[in-house]
Image (spheres, rainbow, N blue to C red):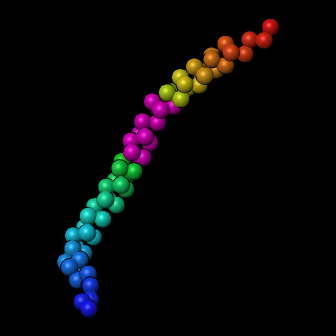
Amino acid sequence: MKRTTFNAIGGWQPFLFCIGMYVVALFFSIFVCSSVFYALNAKSASKEAERTATVVTAKQQLASVTH
């Protein structure tokens, strides 16, 4: 019987390693860049949160008329 081995994949190992490291680095760079972006633009994010809270409060007042 002929024995099946995976010797051919040994040549692909450095290439696959580089692809894997690229994907991991890309994921972390997107995470870090978005964190820095939101940290620097905290004022506009807080204004957006206040605007959303005002809209939600107005909707709750309109919906809770019980007189």
Which sits in the foreground, 15 or 51?
15
Picture layout, residue 36 above or below residue 17: above
Q: Residue at x 57, y 19 (%)?
A: 55
Q: Quadrant of the C terminus?
A: top right
Picture layout, residue 37 above or below residue 9: above
* Membership of 37 in magenta stretch: yes
Does 12 sit left or right of 63 as displayed? left
Does 63 sit left or right of 50 as displayed? right
Q: x and y percent of residue 54 in the render?
A: 59, 20
Residue 25, quarter of the rendered image: bottom left
* Membership of 38 in magenta stretch: yes
Range of magenta residues: 34-46
Q: x and y percent of residue 65 in the render?
A: 74, 11
Picture layout, residue 37 above or below residue 21: above
Q: x and y percent of residue 62 in the render?
A: 67, 13
List the single residue furthest toward the bottom. 1
Q: Residue at x 34, y 61 (%)?
A: 24
Does 5 sit left or right of 51 as displayed? left
Specify the principal SS of the magenta part.
helix
